[in-house]
Image (spheres, rainbow, N blue to C red):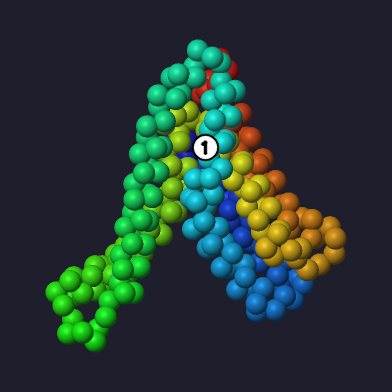
Amino acid sequence: MDRVVDRVQLARTVLGAAATIALILAYNVDRNRWEDAAWGGVANLIVAPFVLLIAGPLVILAFISYAPPHLRPHLRSRLRAPLKAVGWYVLSLGVIGGVCVLATHIDTDDGRSLWEYAWAVAALIVVVWGLPFFILASLYSARSAFNSAQVHPMLPPVLTLALVWVFALFNLIDSGMPAGPPIVKIGSILGGPLSVTAVSLWELRRMRTRFNVTLRA
């Protein structure tokens, strides 16, 4: 793992958060805007794996298609690790969701059978252990792009590029333009995606120039 890239990504995240706070303070945005900004950031982290599940296959397909013909079978053979990560993520989500749904059908007025006690304990385990695990798994999946680096080192930043613009479009549709002058509105909408794009392109260039990692070699 390239620690320089990690530090640059962390710095971009901190600066992005600071810029958001500065805009909110500068234009005296009410409390609801603070809450929307905070919950929007959390929601993006949780929803990111689901967006990856939908958009990721298209990006990976385009990525492999762009590779030279002699490398495509090799890249396809390395899809096992991401597919395994996706499988475990979907399975854990299914188990958590299934237990929660079945727990809502427990009838506490019929004597509380052994079956109902078992499902009540399972639901409690899901709440205490399963939900934190799901949140941490979502954060890791979004960070690692479901272990896509095992297919090719350049794939994670490419997926990040696609993901950030999808989120920018969703946020624009959901929340609309922020308050402030036109230049501030444009900067608020495009600042995050453009900065992530710049870091991702720099990471790709660094792989090529410093580590001699290329796709069409």
| Three-letter amino acid code of the residue under disc 1 | Pro
Q: Farthest residue in the top direction?
A: 70
The quarter of the picture where the N terminus appears is top left
The spot of residue 170 in percent (x, y) is 65, 56
Give the percent coordinates (x, y) of residue 15. Answer: 63, 55
The residue that disc 1 covers is 57
Residue sitting farthest toward the front: 110
Residue at 52%, 37% in the rendered image: 57
Residue lying at 49% horizontally and 45% vertically, measured from the top left = 53
* Vertical comparison of 69 with 79: above or below: above
Of the pair 98 and 78, the residue shown nearer to us: 98
- Side of 170 relative to 120 (left or right): right
Residue at image location 67% in from the left, 40% down from the top: 198
In this view of the protein, which residue sits in the foreground, 175 or 11? 175
The quarter of the displayed image where residue 98 is located: bottom left
Question: Is 175 positioned to the left or the right of 159 in the image?
Answer: right
Q: Please say whether residue 162 is visible from this viewpoint.
A: yes
Residue sitting at the far left = 114
* Residue 151 point in image, percent of width and height: 44, 29
Residue 208 lies in what quarter of the image? Answer: top right
> Horizontal and vertical percent for residue 61?
54, 30
Secondary structure beneath dot 1 equals helix
Residue occupying the far bottom of the picture: 109
**Which residue is nearer to you in this view: 1 or 83?**
83
- Position of residue 207 relative to residue 19, above or below, is above
User: Where's the C terminus, which quadrant?
Assistant: top right
* Quarter location, residue 130: bottom left
Residue density around tag 1, few if under 14, some if 14–19, many if 20 or more, within 10 Å: few
Q: Name the residue at 56% across, 68% down.
A: 39
Q: Is residue 5 visible?
A: no
Total count of labels: 1
